[in-house]
Image (cartoon, rainbow, N blue to C red):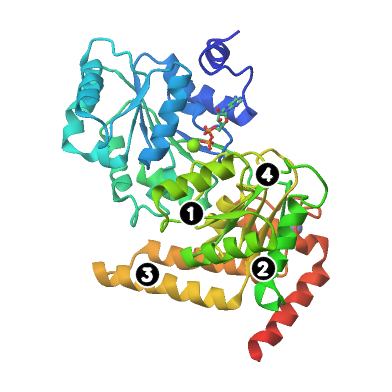
Amino acid sequence: MTAIKTALKTHFGFESFRSQKQEDAVKAVVKGDRDVFVCMPTGSGKSLCYQLPAMLAKGITLVISPLIALIQDQVEHLRDLNIPACSINSKLPVEDRRLIMADLESESPKLKLLYVTPEMVASPGFKPCLTGLLSRSLLSYLAVDEAHCVSQWGHDFRPDYLKLGELRSSLPGVPCIALTATAPQRVKDDIAKSLRLRLPLSFATPVFRSNLHYDVVYRELLEDPYRHLHTYIRENLRLGDGPKGQGCGIVYCRTRECCETVAYQLTKLGVLAKPYHAGLKAVDRTEAQTDWMQGKVLVIVATISFGMGVDKANVRFVAHWNVAKSLASYYQESGRAGRDGLPSSCRTYYSPRDKEQLNFLIRKEVARKQAKRGSEKEQDKSSIKDFEAMVSFCEQESCRHATISNFFGDQKPDCGSACDYCQDPKAVRAQLEKAATLSTK
Ligand code: ADP
Ligand code: MG
Ligand code: ZN
């Protein structure tokens, strides 16, 4: 058995790799002569692509991740496996921090994986620690997780992700591994450029997932939208036919109020649903998530703040009560369905009024940002373009899967009947025609 296979078994307890892509990526990282770009769907095991090589390397792997919560999950998971991992963050007690620093400064540190947020990396206190490791050749890899933060929302959310290019440049000879869920070609280009990757080897999974059925329903054409949603949920969770354990689902809404309303209406109709949004107290939010994770609540009605880092296999449907803000986010959000490979459903309840509202909000946000900095940026256009791609997805008479694949730079997939258009193009046309008469009334 190779050292890699042995490490896979002894450290992580896995008999085999998840996929050929995962194996290839791990091997490329272990080889260590090139930067590596891993672009695989959420849940496909990207972390292993740097965690396993980290265990085989002499030094320490520095991992950048955008959120302390994500970091804590990962670190806990690794510690359960007896892998020396930790995180330095603003919430860390002084004494713990001192212990970590002492280990890092020791001759042969025990630590293998050090997780930090981009803010922490940029802080002056962290600099000496890095240079110390670097000068002693104890920095094995730089892994940048959720690398799309550089491009997609880097400006608003994580300005410090943009500084990672500088960090990367200051670590010559340390291979960089950038990891992201499926990203549009444009975003991938951005990542490579911002992180200053050097001729990266790329490992990407095709975006097409044949077990996901996509469709679009015009909400305004429905007599009773909540009942319609309720029926959809019952069908997808097979609530009609017997015992529990038929999986669960997510309904995404844009606003807090909407989450509350939809959850209330569903519960009233007989499907226990809980809201999840930033307006709830932290304990209530955690409870909603835990109940859903444990299957006590079948449906969670959430804003898009829900789902990052959530890994649940038996999500049978993801419904968008409001149209997503971009096709990229929609692919990611709807992609939380069917991780177990079983047939699952992704539906958007589309509404032209909704579209106008969101369109207005996006443009307003862009204008606000432009006014603030007094100039226009490429990124501004991209949020509008990505939204338009989402609108086309809903309004077009064509295969939904093909639209998605095309957006991510993949070839047209063989949809079969995994979308409403391929299943029944006439019905899609009929709906569009009906919607057109509505809007002229
Ligand atoms: P991603 O970052 O791509 O969303 P993660 O790295 O968080 O995915 O991994 C998702 C899950 O897959 C984790 O529970 C992980 O333990 C598991 N996993 C990773 N590699 C393997 C493997 N080779 N065999 C079985 N499970 C794996
Ligand atoms: Mg991940
Ligand atoms: Zn299709």
Q: Nearer the viewer, mark 1 or mark 3?
A: 3
Kindly identify the amino acid type of the residue bearing the numbered disc 3: Val
Q: Are marks 1 and 2 in contact (CB under 8 Å)?
A: no
Task: Give the distance between the C-alpha atoms of the residues marked 3 and 2, in whole angstroms.
Answer: 33 Å
Task: Give the distance between the C-alpha atoms of the residues marked 3 and 4, in whole angstroms.
Answer: 34 Å
Q: Nearer the viewer, mark 3 or mark 2?
A: 2
Ligand 3 lies in quarter: bottom right
Disc 1: which residue: 186
* Residue 198 in view: no
Badge 1 or badge 3: first in the primary sequence? 1
Badge 1 or badge 2: first in the primary sequence? 1
Badge 3 or badge 4: first in the primary sequence? 4
Q: Are marks 4 and 1 in contact (CB under 8 Å)?
A: no
Kindly identify the amino acid type of the residue bearing the numbered disc 1: Arg
Q: Nearer the viewer, mark 1 or mark 2?
A: 2
Badge 2 or badge 4: first in the primary sequence? 2
Q: Nearer the viewer, mark 4 or mark 1?
A: 4
Disc 4: which residue: 338
Badge 3 or badge 2: first in the primary sequence? 2
Q: Are marks 3 and 4 in contact (CB under 8 Å)?
A: no
Q: Is disc 2 surrounded by few (<14), some (14 to 19) or many (20+) residues within 10 Å?
A: some
Q: Is residue 362 above or below residue 306?
A: below
Q: Residue at x 39, y 65 (%)?
A: 380
Disc number placed over residue 226 in the picture, else none: 2
- The quarter holding residue 404 reads bottom right
